[in-house]
Image: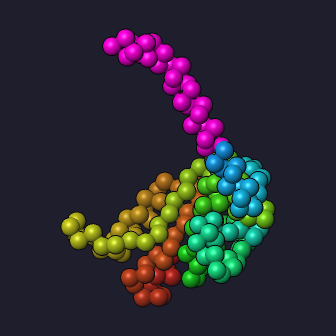
């Protein structure tokens, strides 16, 4: 009981020390990962632009040690390049979202260079399965999720939609997208 009482008297100091250790651990982990994997410091701005040169997906790059990962460029902005339609490249879309998220938290990113605008939300609609118990098909789930995105996105949001309307004909799926 004496130990418990002594510890409880110092609880604020212990919480503060734990917070400092946790913060140091996160920052050290980010720095170590950036150094080992040749990440670069992104430029952060409020101009609504995402410009990535030779971006890489860090997980896919690590997992595919035998084959060379091919870096990709990205340009999105609030002017002429608000949307990109990509076919057959789910990894690329996830890579853009991941690089954007990493930049937002203050991490270096897997790219030759990156200029990332401040993003308030990242929405994804990637993969779905039937929810038979509630009577919702894959298509209905997709449309519900897209509706949520459209209602909550702002001009500063990044939206990643993968294979919208895949349960429909190609023409219908393209029209929905």
Question: What x and y, as percent, mark residue 126?
Answer: 47, 69
Taking 158 as reference, is 165 above or below it?
below
- The segment highlighted magenta reads 1-27
Q: Is residue 13 magenta?
A: yes
Taking 128 as reference, is 153 above or below it?
above
Image mark count = 0
Which residue is more in the foreground, 102 or 85? 102
Asked if one can make out residue 48 in the rendered structure from this viewpoint, the answer is no
Asked if one can make out residue 170 in the rendered structure from this viewpoint, the answer is yes
Taking 41 as reference, is 75 above or below it?
below
Which residue is more in the foreground, 55 or 122? 55
Question: Does residue 36 appear to the left or right of 89 in the view shown?
Answer: right
Residue drawn where x is 63% and y is 75% of the image: 65
Question: What x and y, as percent, mark residue 11?
Answer: 47, 19
Question: Does residue 162 appear to the left or right of 116 in the view shown?
Answer: left
Residue drawn where x is 39% and y is 84% of the image: 168
What secondary structure prevails in the magenta region?
A: helix
Question: What x and y, as percent, mark residue 53?
Answer: 77, 68
The image quarter in which residue 71 lies: bottom right
Residue drawn where x is 48% and y is 88% of the image: 171
Residue drawn where x is 44% and y is 17% of the image: 7
Q: Is residue 53 magenta?
A: no
Taking 18 as reference, is 110 above or below it?
below
Return the residue found at the far left: 133
Q: Quadrant of the N terminus?
A: top left
Question: What x and y, as percent, mark residue 33?
Answer: 67, 55
């Amino acid at each position: 009981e004496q130990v418990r009482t002594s510890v409880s008297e110092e609880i604020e100091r212990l919480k503060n020390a734990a917070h400092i250790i946790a913060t140091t651990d996160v920052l050290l982990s980010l720095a170590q990962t950036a150094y080992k994997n040749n990440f670069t410091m992104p430029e952060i701005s409020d101009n609504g632009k995402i410009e990535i040169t030779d971006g890489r997906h860090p997980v896919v790059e690590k997992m595919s040690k035998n084959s060379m990962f091919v870096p990709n460029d990205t340009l999105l902005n609030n002017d002429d390049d608000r949307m990109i339609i990509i076919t057959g490249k789910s990894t690329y879309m996830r890579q853009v979202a991941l690089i954007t998220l990493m930049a937002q938290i203050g991490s270096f990113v897997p790219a030759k260079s990156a200029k990332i605008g401040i993003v308030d939300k990242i929405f994804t609609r990637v993969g779905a399965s039937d929810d038979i118990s509630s009577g919702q098909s894959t298509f209905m789930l997709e449309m519900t999720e897209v509706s949520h995105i459209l209602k909550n996105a702002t001009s500063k949001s990044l939206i990643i939609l993968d294979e919208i309307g895949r349960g429909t004909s190609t023409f219908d799926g393209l029209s929905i997208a």
